[in-house]
Image: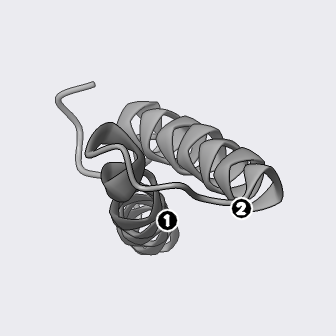
Amino acid sequence: MASPTPGFFKKIKIAGKVLMAGSGAILAPAVADVHMPGVLMEIAKGLFIAGSVMVAVAAVAVEGE
């Protein structure tokens, strides 16, 4: 895991972080008791999970293996 990360996986990691940030912005008003449609909440949860998996996979990808 100490080896350099390939460029493609760096882009995947950035995209995953963007998905997580966007879903966090959608989920944040729910914490403040603002009513949000259930479908929107489920989509945001799915995007957060997808983003976190993307970041995790990109974090363990190393060059040369």
Q: Is 57 situated above or below 28? A: above
- Which residue bears the numbered disc 2? 40
| Local secondary structure at mark 1 | helix
Question: Residue 4 vs residue 54: left or right?
Answer: left
Quadrant for the N terminus in the image: top left
**Earlier sequence position, callout 2 versus callout 1:** 1
| Local secondary structure at mark 2 | helix
Q: Nearer the viewer, residue 7 or 35?
A: 35
Question: Residue 52 vs residue 44: left or right?
Answer: left
> Which residue is at the far left?
2
Q: Nearer the viewer, residue 38 or 15?
A: 38
- Which residue bears the numbered disc 1? 19
Quadrant of the rendered structure where residue 34 is? bottom left
Question: Residue 8 vs residue 43: left or right?
Answer: left
Question: Residue 46 vs residue 12: left or right?
Answer: right
Quadrant for the C terminus in the image: top right
